[in-house]
Image (cartoon, rainbow, N blue to C red):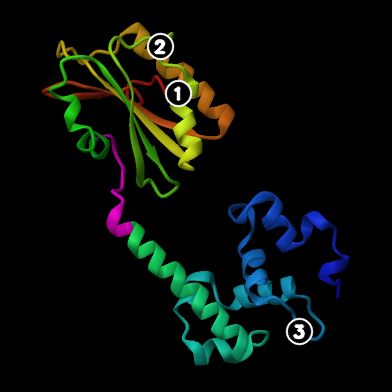
Amino acid sequence: MTKIKDMPRFARPREKLIEKGAQNLKDKELLAILLGTGRAGKNVLEVAEEILAKHPMKNLLALDYKKLAEIKGIGPGKACALLAAFELTKRALEVEDNNLPAINSARDAVDQLQELRQAKKENFVVLYLNARNQLIHKEIISIGTISASLIHPREIFEPAIKFLASQIIAAHNHPSGDLSPSDEDIKVTRRLTAAGELLGIEVLDHLIITATGFTSLKEKGSI
């Protein structure tokens, strides 16, 4: 058995979490941190891997105290810690689901942008989404003529970084009622997409909205 302290620093669950963030850990590494210690003959990572092999994560979340405590390598104390962590997670997700609208299509995004339909000037707005496609922030970037010189990627992605967004949807209106993307619209879209790729923040779509409809540049093949 290799002890955790004898493993390279980058491979130890706690050090990896501190250096790279919890989102970059495997399920067994996250469980190992919650367990804290292993048992005779197995380090905590091996125990976590063994538990997940018999009890996939969703099943593990559904177990009560008695069943958790009976699992070899968990016991009463760790069962309590796991149940507390699971319950906090469930409560947090329930609050999030109830308060953040899900954006799963261009139509869902347009529903969050109704104010653009009647705007007299061109408004460039960005929807910022988390990894679960939920809207976490909306911001007007500019009002006036949309051009690549005015819409700078820095202004688009600065809020994304601030609010920890994983994805964005850009949108602007055409007061003229013309749903066709202009050459400038396509240029802006490609510039933002390229910037997003460098930052690891996906540009899901760029929408053109009028009083009577909308156009998705993703569907047009510009993304």
Using the numbered discs, state the Cα–Cα distance from disc 3 to disc 1 in whole angstroms.
Answer: 52 Å
Quadrant in the rendering for residue 71: bottom right
Q: Which mark is residue 150?
A: 2
Q: Is residue 17 visible?
A: yes
Quarter holding residue 183:
top left
The residue lying toward the viewer, choosing from 68 and 100, is: 100
Q: Are marks 2 and 3 in contact (CB under 8 Å)?
A: no
Image quarter of the N terminus: bottom right
Residue 120 position within the rendered picture, expressed as x and y whole percent measured from the top left: 15, 15
Which numbered disc flags the more N-terminal residue, 2 or 1? Answer: 2
Residue bearing the label numbered 1: 155
Where 203 sits versus 88, above or below? above
Bounds of the magenta segment = 97-106
> In which quarter of the view is residue 39 placed?
bottom right
Disc assigned to residue 39:
3
Q: Which mark, residue 46?
A: none
Q: Residue at x 51, y 36 (%)?
A: 161
Residue sitting at 80 percent across and 86 percent down? 40
Q: Is 147 contained in the magenta span?
A: no
Total numbered badges shown on the rendered structure: 3
Check disc 3 and report its element: helix, strand or loop: loop
Residue type beneath disc 1: Glu
The quadrant of the image that shows the C terminus is: top left
Magenta span contains residue 103 = yes
Crowdedness near tag 3: few (<14), some (14–19) or many (≥20) residues, C-alpha within 10 Å: few
